[in-house]
Amino acid sequence: MQVVIGRIGKAHGIRGEVTVEVRTDDPEGRFAAEAVLTTDRPERPTLVIERSRPHHGRMLVLFEGIPDRNTAELLRGTLLSVDAGDDPTLEDPDEYYDHQLVGLAAVTVDGVLLGEVSDVVHLPASVLLAISGNGKREVLVPFVASIVPEVDLAGGRVVVDPPPGLIELSTD
């Protein structure tokens, strides 16, 4: 099973480095030199890391065969993944892979359907669940225990206890 560990952002500098939005709890290990990453681009199915370093909550990565800024910019938006094996179990019961969350129904603690988790947004300081559907605009919900107290993978839902005003702001 392929698990997304990052998304390539903009080029950094003129020598082919790119920023990478990290989606793993082991960025130094996953983005180590000589690591081979699978991409979502058929014209470039794999990328090999030449070197990487942390930079302001992201990684700066130089891939083999990417010699300059112009070539690096062509990679923008590329998803990077690794093979997690057939059973991608996590040690911490409160950790989830993005693909496990996307598609789950989002309901309030009272059982009111808010919509469906359409994306997991990774920011440098936090993770947000994007919830869309049910006649509302997309709403971004911080993925923290106080606001998302329950994730029921078997039941196909996440329970959301939003602070006052969060959901009402998304009503059409």
Image (cartoon, rainbow, N blue to C red):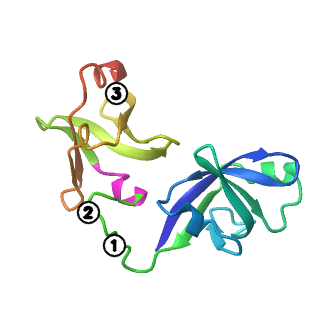
Sequence-first tag of 3 and 2: 2
Q: Is residue 49 left or right of residue 90?
A: right
Q: Which mark is in front, 3 or 1?
A: 1
Judge whether residue 57 can be spotted in this image.
yes
Magenta stretch contains residue 100: yes
Q: Position of residue 170 (x, y in %)?
A: 36, 23
Q: Element under label 2?
A: loop
Q: Is residue 17 or residue 83 the one in the foreground?
A: 17
- The residue lying at 38 percent from left, 73 percent from top is 88
Span shown in magenta: 98-104
Q: Amino acid at mark 1?
A: Thr
Q: Are marks 3 and 1 in contact (CB under 8 Å)?
A: no
Name of the residue lying farthest toward the left: 110
Q: Which residue is mark 1?
A: 89
- The residue lying at 20 percent from left, 34 percent from top is 161
Give the quarter of the figure containing the C terminus.
top left
Magenta stretch contains residue 123: no
In this view, 110 is above or below 43: above
